[in-house]
Image (cartoon, rainbow, N blue to C red):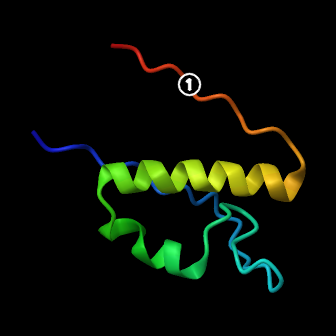
């Protein structure tokens, strides 16, 4: 059974922060943006988790709680 890949976390605010080195919209680095389509679903989910932490650190806002997925 093949895992379904996740949609890109891009929110069309594409500006790389010269200090932090990540996009101010999705919080990915240039390398993470380039690699997204080559990641498997598990790797994409791990990166999403990293991005949520990065966003929380950059904005001072608490990380959002994960949504529950219906079985």
Q: Report the residue at 44% width, 20% height from top.
A: 69
Q: Report the residue at 63% width, 55% height from top.
A: 51
Relative height, residue 20 to residue 7 (above, below) = below
Left or right, 68 with respect to 52, comes to left
Of all residues shown, which one is farthest toward the right? 60
Left or right, 69 with respect to 60, comes to left
Where is residue 56 shown, x and y percent of the image? 79, 49
Q: Nearer the viewer, residue 15 or 28?
A: 28
Report the residue marked by disc 1: 67
Where is residue 20 shown, x and y percent of the image? 78, 77
Relative height, residue 31 to residue 38 (above, below) = below
Estimate how packed mark 1 is, as few (under 14), some (14 to 19) or many (20 or more) residues with alpha carbons within 10 Å. few
Q: Report the residue at 51% width, 72% height from top.
A: 32
Describe the element under mark 1 as helix, strand or loop. Answer: loop
Q: Report the residue at 54% width, 51% height from top.
A: 48
Relative height, residue 48 to residue 64 (above, below) = below
Quarter of the N terminus within the rendering: top left
Left or right, 46 with respect to 27, comes to left
Of all residues shown, which one is farthest toward the left? 1
| Total numbered circles | 1
| Quadrant housing residue 27 | bottom right
Of all residues shown, which one is farthest toward the bottom? 18
| Quadrant housing residue 10 | bottom right
Quarter of the C terminus within the rendering: top left
């Amino acid at each position: 059974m093949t895992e379904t890949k996740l949609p890109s976390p891009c929110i069309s605010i594409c500006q790389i922060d010269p200090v932090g080195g990540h996009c101010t919209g999705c919080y990915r680095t240039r390398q993470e943006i380039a690699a997204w389509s080559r990641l498997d679903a598990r790797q994409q989910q791990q990166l999403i988790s990293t991005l949520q932490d990065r966003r929380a650190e950059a904005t001072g806002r608490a990380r959002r709680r994960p949504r529950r997925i219906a079985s």
